[in-house]
Amino acid sequence: MSAPLHENERIKLASHYLRGTLAQSLADELTGALNPDDAQISKFHGFYQQDHRDLRQERRERYLEPYFGFMLRARLPGGVCTPAQWLAIDGIGRELTSGSLRLTTRQSFQYHGILKRHIKPVIQGINRVMIDSLGGCGDVNRNVLCNPNPVESALHREVHEWAKRISECLLPRTRAYHELWLDGEQVGGGEDVEPLYGESYLPRKFKTAVAVPPHNDVDVYANDLGFVAIAEEGRLEGFNVLAGGGMGATHGDKSTFPRLADPLGFIEPHQTLAVAEAVVSTQRDLGDRRDRVHARLKYTIERIGLDAFRAEVERRAGLRFAPSRPVRFTDQGDRYGWVKGRDDHWHLTLYIESGRLIDGPGHGPMTGLREIARIHQGDFRITPNQNLIVAGVPEARKAGIERLARAHGLLAEERSALRRNGLACVALPTCPLAMAEAERYFPDFMDQVERLAHRHGLADQEMVIRMTGCPNGCARPYLAELALVGKGPGHYNLMLGGDGIGKRLNRLYRENLDETAILAEIDSLFGRFAANRQPGERFGDYLIRDGLVRAVVNPAEDYHD
Ligand code: SRM
Ligand code: SF4
């Protein structure tokens, strides 16, 4: 007998196109929480119920309910927003949330610590400046990534338009968001339709990215669906389509693993939306709705095989994929500092450590960005690496913006190459799934790594280092040259061997190490690398060449090896 559908399937179906009893849950003043079914449905509207984990024990001892707060994540295709939008985002963050902003690895921003009564004003506030949070989370297509590529300005504009169109095309059509948050008129029962998603939406979250080679800052291979722009002399010819990437895994569960997306083939631009819909609808119908652990597209493709999947997508989209075009990626990080675009405007990539914007004594990144937004006339682009680009600056305003960025510690120039390529997920105290620290520990950890790098003459070495508080992979650790993946308080798995361009998965090197053991391993590996590397060789490539790490061939078998 086959297993029953997962409980979340009942919740989605009963929610009447994502309404659930959210209105009642929000009105209930006796608790800071939502009822459990609504806590699942709220994700489709972009917000998660969390509680402050540092305060759990103390509140339990005082017989108080957990300190509930909500995280809200916006939908911001390609991470682009205007200075006016930035000022609104910043103002809402200071007035109605914990007072900080968090730029994410998917080019969006999150608020944390929103009290239940403030959820609606927050959503209304961002909507007033034309930003929404529909599909920020939940079993639908999430924020669509798009390479910021400011130098190729015209190509970027064209590709970014496609990212927006894909995002709109894959957006839920329910009026529940409008009704609940924007005081839209109630729509009578049965009138809503979700032509793409149906009443049960997808079996699991779904992620899409658009990359513009040679830069792979979107980590396109980590997405369920990837579009790699193929351009000739700055003109978009079409896309190589990829499917079935994903990072999430579970410690000790050998049936779970990170996976790179596979190539489906090449399409012309006008075929983009048909392919996006066909991939989503195939996953909607063939994805596993009984076991959420195996419900992502990567497991569907593993189960039915790539050829069968491609054939089904072709049938639904009414086309045949052409052979993929050759593509070369050169990096997966951000390009800091000023670069000049083809339109003679300047673009400044700022460094935001772990994407966290919070003002503290002697340190005011939020204030700095507010001041920049007040004089900036171009736009802002959140990068897929938790940083921010001040884009489209005319020569005359360059010096003023640079002065503000420097005064508020937003320039990358004082940071080492190691730190500039770092990513850490949110983890404690807000993430309920965190097993170890990430964002809060990363700066101290990097101090130690820099000390070791310095000792071995590697201070200027470009290296992709990432840290997550659990194996879910929110900072895409399995694509790093060196990664720490949280195993328990103060303990991490050490993963090694990414290629620095996001095309090779790394591999488990040592399990469950504490800081002393991790630093001892890094010390020894840095020593060997410094002594034996070839000119221009990356750390991850060296580890594979020297046999210290075996390259992943079959992720399904190699990840837990
Ligand atoms: Fe993530 C769950 C934070 C990008 C894989 N992720 C979570 C939650 C919502 C925890 C939860 O389910 O309750 C985290 C909220 C923490 C907090 O307090 O804010 C969380 N994920 C994040 C962010 C904020 C990390 C960051 O430091 O920037 C990123 C928000 C992106 C956005 O704006 O949409 C974020 N998460 C990712 C990525 C990277 C990416 O998409 O490029 C991944 C790996 C790619 C993938 O999906 O395979 C990722 N997050 C997960 C997973 C594992 C999914 C799986 O297939 O197993 C979970 C857990 C889950 O879904 O059950 C998760
Ligand atoms: Fe939380 Fe784990 Fe994602 Fe980090 S990787 S934010 S600990 S779910």
Image: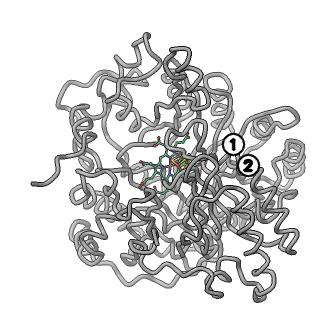
Colour mapping: one colour
Residue at the extreme top of the image, as rendered: 30
Q: x, y (%) of residue 285? A: 21, 57
Q: Is residue 171 above or below residue 314?
A: above
Q: Is residue 28 above or below residue 47?
A: above
Examine the image and state in which quarter residue 497 appears: bottom right
Tell me, yes or no, whether the two marked residues, 2 and 1, touch with CB atoms within 8 Å: yes
Task: Confirm whether residue 155 shows in the render.
Answer: no
**Residue in view at x 35 percent, y 82 percent:** 322
To which residue does mark 1 refer?
A: 356
Q: Is label 1 in a helix, a strand or a loop? A: strand
Q: How dense is the environment of label 1, judged by Cα within 10 Å: few (below 14), some, or many (20 and up)?
A: many
Image quarter where the N terminus lies is bottom left
**Residue in view at x 21 percent, y 70 percent:** 315
**Residue in view at x 28 percent, y 40 percent:** 8
Q: Is residue 263 left or right of residue 367?
A: left
Q: Is residue 485 left or right of residue 283?
A: right
To which residue does mark 2 refer?
A: 352
Q: x, y (%) of residue 14? A: 21, 32
Q: How dense is the environment of label 2, judged by Cα within 10 Å: few (below 14), some, or many (20 and up)?
A: many
Q: Is label 2 in a helix, a strand or a loop? A: loop
The amino acid type of the residue labelled 1 equals Arg
Task: Confirm whether residue 106 shows in the render.
Answer: yes
The amino acid type of the residue labelled 2 equals Ile
Q: CA distance from mark 2 to mark 1?
A: 7 Å
Q: x, y (%) of residue 453? A: 82, 69
**Residue in view at x 44 percent, y 49 percent:** 142
Q: x, y (%) of residue 15? A: 26, 31
Residue 488: give its label: none
Examine the image and state in which quarter residue 62 appears: top right
Nearer the observer, 540 or 107: 540
Q: Is mark 1 within 8 Å of ligand 1?
A: no
